[in-house]
Amino acid sequence: MARGRQSCQIVATLVLLSLQACFAAKKKEDATLGLIELDEANFLGTVTELAPEYDWVLIEFYSHWCPACKAFQPDYKKIATHVFNVMGEEEKAWKGKLDGKPATLAVGRVDCPENSRLCDDFGITSYPTMFLDSPVHFSTKTKDNIREVKPRRRNFNGVISALEKLLDRDLKGSVLPEPKDDQGEVSVDGEHVHQESDIIIPKTEDDRKVTVYPKHADRVDIIGATVLSFEYLGSSALLKGPDARRALSRWLHLLASSHPVKECAMGADAALVSLNKVWDKSSQEIQDLDMFRRLKICGGLTREPWNQCAGSTSESRGYTCGLWMLFHSLSVRMPEKNGSRSGQEWLDVIRGFVQHFFQCGDCAKHFLEYAGKSDARDVDTKRDGVLWLWRTHNLVNDRLSREQDSVGKGDPLFPHQQWPSKEHCRNCIVDTDYFEDNVYKFLFKYYNGTTVTMVDSTLSAVYKKKGASTEAGTSWSFAFIIVALVTAIVYIMLGRSSQYSVLRKKGRK
């Protein structure tokens, strides 16, 4: 009996190893022991091949750009290797009552942006999402009655504990000591990107790094974020319900009216015209997804490699950095109408986009928490919206600096810092306080490319954020200029009058 069970385990192990070897050769990269890389081409064949030897498959649906996913991947790889090793040793096999045999488990993952149709089949709307079921059930490519793994903590021990509860059995040797720097699930915002990341660090000939501070946000990165955001929201799982349709329509309106790149603004306008063709207002879901996916949001422009948003590794920064850059650019270019709450209308559009189409689950959750606070509800004017987004971005940077950088999980060349720094904008900071009037002007120039004049913040402490009102200071300065101009005009007029009187007297003589 034991020998038969051992033979079954050997066969299962050989099946998994052969599948991994095949995928590793195809991807030309080192594979993680026990982890199967799944995609649209191999999914059905793989789960079918696993079915005779494996009772369960754990599959993670994730995104390579999602900060929460990036933070979780080291643990997920450990889970795959641990399950593989445990399963390969008879004395540590999964114990249970599945037909009186030890249950076997395979572990895989799917990168959804690269396999959007496959993830649509399973209704994936948030990353990362983990499903656990039989290979046969997975082969149907349906979410119906599938088990979702929702650990209390998204780390090694949390997932193993959740698996044990779902399968009602023990995985011996599963518990590892908690790392000192791991306080549980890392809460990450799509904000692994940070504004100070707009610093470019090129290499010189002698391989030394030189810091260069650009004058404006990068056009290539804004285009890249726009193109990717449109590609990522093109999912049947996301384009459902009247709220999602309204959020999409408003997002396209904002892009058409405020995008800094003409081709993208025109592309968004064209997409608005096509929206009624692909998604009737009376329908609960999009009718022609293929046509929608063929739309070119930036016309003939395509995505190029990241510039300012490039990280020191291929896994850092990128899309979320570009998305922040796009949000800021839209904020400084939003139309401001008399008698309307332009800032709040803009924020409502951003909130709708994040809620319905930004699939990093932790990222969306944290952003919406910020957008639901009282200071967000107080946003009224365009200036309010621009500064709210800047403050929120810096709050995110501060939190991520503590949660990631302090424990070595962030990008070492791009630590999360408050932005802009003195080097970016010398008039934006007085002592340790931001002078928000100049910050607004700096943001307007940086994300819009328009030249503005800043007040010299070193002249007086009354311009501090916590000091006297900057609007009052500006008003007094304006009043002084008016008085000076009037005085000069009166003086000139009096002078001319006096000269005219003298000439008249001379004429009489």
Image (cartoon, helix red, strand yellow):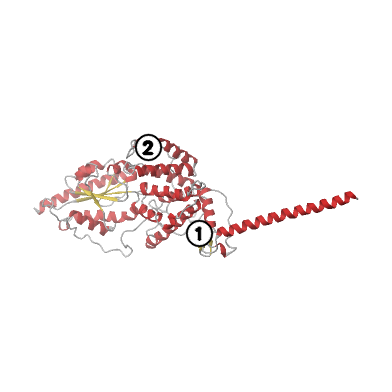
Q: Image point 22% across, 41% down: which residue? A: 140
Mark 2 neighbour class, 10 Å CA radius: few under 14, some 14 to 19, many 20 or more: many
> Is residue 132 at least partly visible in the picture?
yes
Mark 1 neighbour class, 10 Å CA radius: few under 14, some 14 to 19, many 20 or more: some
**Number of disc labels:** 2
Return the residue nearer the eye: 197 or 19. Answer: 197
Q: Is residue 118 positioned above or below 343 on the image?
A: above
Q: Which residue is mark 2?
A: 292
Q: Where residue 405 sits: x, y (%)?
A: 40, 60
How far is disc 1 from disc 2 in space, using C-alphas? Answer: 42 Å
Q: Where residue 338 sits: x, y (%)?
A: 52, 47
Q: Is residue 121 positioned above or below 504 on the image?
A: above
Secondary structure beneath dot 1 equals loop
Q: Where residue 459 sits: x, y (%)?
A: 60, 63
Amino acid on which the number 1 mark rests in the picture: Ser
Return the residue nearer the eye: 464 or 67. Answer: 464
Amino acid on which the number 2 mark rests in the picture: Phe
Query: Residue 151 sits in which quadrant?
Result: bottom left
Single out the residue that lies furthest toward the right: 509
Q: Where residue 354 sits: x, y (%)?
A: 38, 49
The numbered mark, 1 or 2, whose residue comes first in the sequence reads 2
Return the residue nearer the eye: 416 or 455. Answer: 455
Q: Which mark is residue 163?
A: none
Nearer to us of marks 1 and 2 is 2
Q: Is residue 314 left or right of residue 145?
A: right
Q: Image point 34% across, 55% down: which residue? A: 71
Could you tell me if the residues under marks 1 and 2 are in contact, i.e. CB atoms within 8 Å? no
Q: Is residue 463 left or right of residue 301?
A: right
> Is residue 413 at least partly visible in the picture?
no
Secondary structure beneath dot 2 equals helix
Q: Which residue is mark 1?
A: 421
